[in-house]
Amino acid sequence: MNTATTIPYLKMNGLGNEIVVVDLRNSTKTFTPEEVTAVASERMSRFDQMMVLHAPRTSGTESYVRIYNADGSEAGACGNGMRCVGWFLSQGGGRDRFLVETRAGVLDTIVKDETAITVDMGEPKFGWKDIPLAEEFRDTRAIELQIGPIDKPILHSPSAVSMGNPHAVFWVDDVNAYDLGRFGPMLEHHPIFPQRANITLAHIRSREEIAIRTWERGAGLTKACGSAACATAVAAARLKRTGRNVRIVLLGGALDIEWRESDNHVLMTGSVQFEYEGQFPAALFAPGAA
């Protein structure tokens, strides 16, 4: 490739979580953070996460996928994006199951159709070093973190968990009663999270259903965050407030989450939507970058 060559992409969404899928399995190109933010700033290719398929690193996998946030940073996991990748791979015909590797590990994806795609998101991690947190908490079901007056905090005592990326889940009575656009950035960058964190407000409606809103690390307010849905489901089950099968209701729709007892893996099932195909303008990329 050269600067006269454009790079094709697919614009998709997972419950409103804006996803761009780029297939570079036959290319040696990698994106720089500056190129990622340039792509995200274009009206047609604006995204919450960009899923870039590279040649596989591990035998038996379809691809190694780099996951980029809109600010140019890399993420370890993106559940909505992985469903989009699974749908894209299934368009080759004849197969409905794919192993894809990310920074968080190898993920198993099963595609029934675009309304029902299941991703095995692997095992959640609860140890403070694994999340990671900046200081020791023996019990991460509720860590010492709050916003507001010490005697009457606005938000406090979140559950912390890693789903390949760090999450903090605050339990509230109404997810719409808080200015998450204001609190989200403060909490994402709180010193307790050395790698920053995804911030979720969660309201347990019943033992089978939870409503959430999420401020996504590196992307901001989002209509849906698959890994946050998984983190919320396992955090609620750890607190004995739900069972291990629960529906997570997000602004963009619902996800069904199963925290499987047999191997401790978290299975996420939901839909995706294809929007259009496009090509990045060649001017976005540095000479020789492609």
Image (tube, rainbow, N blue to C red):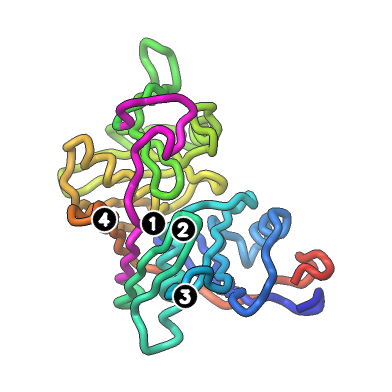
Does residue 50 appear to the left or right of 248 in the view shown? right
Give me the residue at 37% from left, 89% from top: 94
Residue position marked by numbered label 2 in the rendering: 17
**Identity of the amino acid at label 3?**
Glu
Residue at 63% of width from left, 49% of height from top?
71
Task: Find disc 3 in the rendering and name its residue.
Answer: 62
Element type at mark 2? strand
Mark toward the viewer: 1 or 3 = 3
Q: Sort mark 4 into few (<14), some (14-19) or many (20+) by Cα contacts within 10 Å.
A: many
| Camera-side mark, 4 or 3 | 3
Residue 48 in the image, given as x and y percentages of width and height: 54, 55
What's the CA distance linking mark 1 and mark 3?
29 Å
Q: Nearer the viewer, residue 149 or 145?
A: 145
Say whether residue 118 is magenta: yes
Element assignment for label 4:
strand
Question: Which range is magenta?
Answer: 116-140
- Foreground mark, 4 or 1, reads 4
